[in-house]
Amino acid sequence: MSADAVATLAARLRAALRVTVLTGAGVSRASGVPTFRGAEGLWRQFRPEDLATPEAFHRDPALVWEWYAWRREMIAACRPNTAHDVLARWSETGCRVVTQNVDDLHLTAGTRNLVRLHGSIWELACANGCGQPRWRDERVPLPEVPPVCPRCSSLARPAVVWFGEGLAPEDVEAAMHACTCDVFLAVGTSSLVYPAAGLVGEARRGGAFTVEINTERTAASAQVDLAIQAPAEAVLLRVDELRTTNSEPRTLNRT
Ligand code: BJW
Ligand code: ZN
């Protein structure tokens, strides 16, 4: 980890009034949640088109649910790591956190006003669209797989966003709004999946100082003002230390 880059980021954060952080699967890696892409990613073992599309669910809901039940079990054993904890603290002073993660570890860590662009693996929805609002079910294992809708008894689905599906308009609007900021950080995301991957460019066009924190170079590395190639949990902890030891913590986003 470059000490200069980390010091630059800490200084930018001290001077910033509005800070937004976009997170991806890399933020939960240190908690034990697998990422999607990369050497140990889920897409090495499974094809997204077999498991993470509406067509896949229509074709074989039992298979799709088996995969989600397995992931729910794995995630249930995971706790938030330092990266989640630091971002939860920053959110208390107004930092906006937008996540692509469905594991809800940001919520467990206590992050306020979280925007969950791709939904939650702990929430279910009626696959038949009968009007039943989505519901939360954290039971592991689920008593019935595939589970059914409590209102109309047709199949339930995980309340996550699959490829080819639109994101909730209010989440997209909140994320776009958060792009108007002084510092925008893209943390632990491969920046390949849209519309989330477009947010960093949006923030930059709006005048934000853009930063990437990732263990690898990504599609966004050449686009950002500062790319820090190191684990998110280590960088955020160090930045948080510098930010709070060199000055009083600032109240963000209160303009
Ligand atoms: C670390 C680390 C450590 C590891 N520290 N770093 C424009 C252009 C091209 C294509 C499209 C486009 N617009 C739309 C599309 C199509 C598609 C898309 O983007 N395809 C691309 C792949 C080409 N997008 C969609 O379909 C989206 N829908 C949409 O746009 O709808 C339009 C529409 C409108 C109206 C009606 C109908 C349609 C939906 C996308 C949904 C994505 N869903 C998933 C699954 C969620 C549910 C589940 O979990 O099962 O979301 S796919 C998967 O990818 C998941 C993630 O949230 C998402 C992003 O992945 P992420 O977080 O970046 O993870 P990884 O694994 O890719 O990267 C991890 C990174 O961490 C790596 O870089 C590591 O190096 C790093 N790392 N350890 C720091 N310790
Ligand atoms: Zn229903």
Image (tube, rainbow, N blue to C red):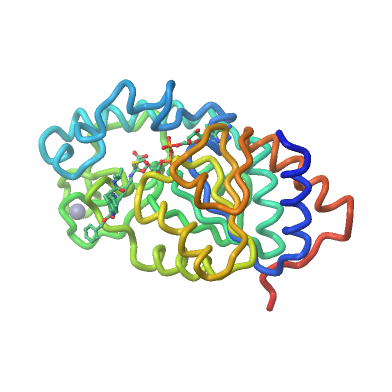
Horizontal arrangement in the rendering, residue 60 relative to residue 35 (left or right): left
Between 146 and 227, the one nearer to me in the picture:
227
For ligand 2, the image quadrant comes to bottom left
Specify the quadrant of the image occupied by residue 84.
top right
Percent position of residue 106, x then y: 56, 46
Quadrant in which residue 92 is drawn: bottom right
Residue 95 against residue 37 in the figure, above or below:
below
Query: Residue at the left extreme?
Result: 59
Figure check: 29 above or below 90:
above
Q: Where's the N terminus, which quadrant?
A: top right
Q: Residue at x 41, y 54 (%)?
A: 196
Name of the residue lying farthest toward the bottom: 255
* Residue drawn 70% across the image and 46% down it: 86
Single out the residue that lies furthest toward the front: 222
Q: Residue sitting at 25 percent across and 44 percent down?
A: 157
Q: Nearer the viewer, residue 96 or 67?
A: 96
Query: Total marks drawn?
Result: 0
| Residue 42 x/y as whole percent | 37, 27
User: Residue 250: percent from the left, percent from the top?
Assistant: 79, 64
Image location (x, y in percent) of residue 224: 55, 52
Q: Is residue 232 left or right of residue 64?
A: right
Which quarter of the rendered picture does the C terminus lie within?
Answer: bottom right
Q: Report which quarter residue 173 is drawn in.
A: bottom left
